[in-house]
Image (tube, rainbow, N blue to C red):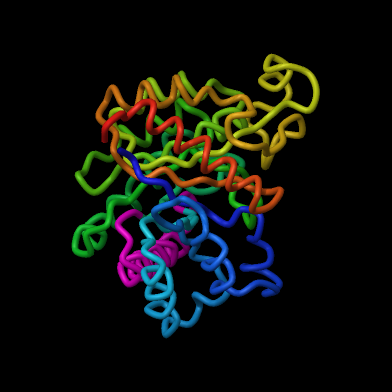
Amino acid sequence: MPQLAVFPKAFLRALCQDGTMRLSEWIELAAQLDIDGLEWYAGFLEMADEANWARFRRQVEDHGKVIPMMCCSPDFTHPDAGFRQREIAKQHRWMDMTHALGGTHCRVLSGQRRPGLSTEEGVGLAAECIQTCLPYARERGITLILENHYKDDFWEYPEFAQQADVFCALLEKVHDPNFGVNYDPSNAYLAGEDPLALLGRVSHRVVTMHASDRYLIEGNLDDLRREEGGAAGYAKRLRHGEIGQGLNDYDAIFTELKRVGFNGWISIEDGVEGMDQLARSVGFLRQKLAQHWPGA
């Protein structure tokens, strides 16, 4: 059966910008949930000091949990080769961090969709950088996971491979045992696309998943696709919500993942309204996992 992790979506500003929350506090909160692990973020303020890496791993493991996944955002589509090399160096450090924490999966992205960058050029640049990182990942027992992302909080432009056709083109450029997909169904909506259609194209390469949910605050899906397709950042018509209460069809998602033999980590990136909501989302997913992977 897949295992569940959580990500501190509601506390990112406190943990990454203003420092009003300590990582030890988040660990204590998350440890009370019915989960197996905590997805980590490379941008946590306290992770800048490498001396903290072993300490936080111990604290998580003392609660019987693990840190399976690292969330980070390399920008591999910049036209300057020196810039791309510095991004590769950052990715190496994030892999070192993942390894020190006991993790096995580290996110990669394509980069920013800068004006004037053709699909062919952008796919080529991102694929080259990812391939450059793979030997380093292999040495550390890490799988690089490409997410169908929308836009890093600190980027000027949206994700280059936000659209499914571009994402799949990049995916086809890189084939390696230490490379796979981190599937996020909600991000497909942010691209104005159907998450089940995307899953049908990439399910055989999905090794991890982000679980969340979205709901429409006005209009319908046709309005969303027409007005928000490829939007930079979150679509104005969509809001975070409790998992199981929004647009995502988790029965259809899990049916397809079970069909292809998926048995990886599912990390919950939700709970923006607090820990009670996050606990309900955990409960919903536990129920669905038991339903689709009975006896596992």
Q: Which of 151 and 70 is in front in this view?
A: 70
Magenta highlight on residue 46: no
Q: Which residue is drawn at 50% across and 48% down?
A: 111
Q: Nearer the viewer, residue 222 or 292?
A: 292
Q: Which residue is drawn at 38% across and 72% down?
A: 62
Q: Which of 255 and 195 is in front in this view?
A: 255
257 to 242, vertically: above or below: above
Report the span colored magenta: 76-105
Q: Nearer the viewer, residue 33 or 84?
A: 33
Q: Residue at x 70, y 18 (%)?
A: 226
Q: Residue at x 44, y 62 (%)?
A: 87
Q: Main secondary structure of the magenta part?
A: helix
15 to 165, vertically: above or below: below
Left or right: residue 135 compared with residue 102: left
Q: Quadrant of residue 11?
A: bottom right
Q: In x, y percent, where is residue 268?
A: 51, 45
Left or right: residue 13 compared with residue 248: right
Residue sitting at the far bottom? 51
Q: In which quarter of the image is the C terminus?
A: top left
Q: Quadrant of residue 134?
A: bottom left
Left or right: residue 176 compared with residue 290: left
Please state the total of marks drawn on the protein image: 0
Q: In which quarter of the image is the N terminus?
A: top left
Q: In x, y percent, where is residue 153?
A: 64, 54
Q: In x, y percent, where is residue 52?
A: 45, 81
Magenta highlight on residue 93: yes
143 to 94, vertically: above or below: above
Q: In x, y percent, where is residue 139?
A: 19, 63
